[in-house]
Amino acid sequence: MSRNIDTELLDELARFTLGDMCRICGVHAEFLVELIDEGVISPSSGPSARAAQPWQFDGIAVVRVQRAVRLQQDLGVNLAGIALALELLDEIEALRRRP
């Protein structure tokens, strides 16, 4: 069961673990890993040869995962389509912010 978070309160400074992301967005860890593989989200830190920390995600990743879930559930969009749609939405938002 997903728990909605007020996305207005999220920012880049907020940090969430993989487990937090699963609970907040109502998804399985496998789905998040697939989104990482597609480039939809990226952990701000994570397991590597140099870092023994678990993955950490920012508030923007929460918003992107929630959008990805809606695209998949409401429209049946696959992972590649989700990545493309979110990229285009990002571009639209950037254009709207331009003076």
Image (cartoon, rainbow, N blue to C red):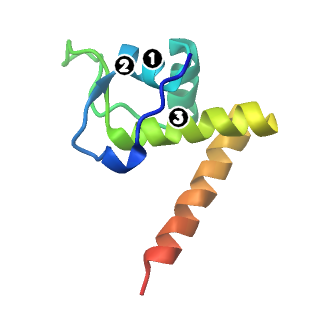
Q: Which mark is residue 65?
A: 3
- Secondary structure under tag 1 reads helix
- Secondary structure under tag 2 reads helix
Is residue 43 among what the camera can see?
yes
Give the position of the N terminus as an image quadrant: top right
Residue on which disc 1 sits: 23
Badge 3 or badge 2: first in the primary sequence: 2
Comparing 75 with 81, the one in front is 75
The reply, left or right, for residue 70 in relation to residue 34 is right
The part of the image, by quadrant, that contains residue 99 is: bottom left
Q: Position of residue 63 (x, y in %)?
A: 47, 42
Residue lying at 55% horizontally and 13% vertically, measured from the top left: 28
The residues bearing labels 1 and 3 have C-alpha atoms spaced at a distance of 12 Å
The reply, left or right, for residue 2 in relation to residue 57 is right
Q: Are marks 1 and 2 in contact (CB under 8 Å)?
A: yes
**Badge 1, how many Cα within 10 Å: few under 14, some, many 20+?**
some
Three-letter code for the amino acid on which mark 3 is drawn: Val
Three-letter code for the amino acid on which mark 1 is drawn: Arg
Q: Which mark is residue 20?
A: 2
Residue lying at 48% horizontally and 32% vertically, measured from the top left: 4
The residues bearing labels 3 and 2 have C-alpha atoms spaced at a distance of 12 Å
Q: Are marks 3 and 2 in contact (CB under 8 Å)?
A: no
Check the image and name the residue furthest to the right: 76
The reply, left or right, for residue 73 in relation to residue 54 is right
The residues bearing labels 1 and 2 have C-alpha atoms spaced at a distance of 5 Å
The reply, left or right, for residue 29 in relation to residue 11 is right
- Secondary structure under tag 3 reads helix
Badge 1 or badge 3: first in the primary sequence: 1
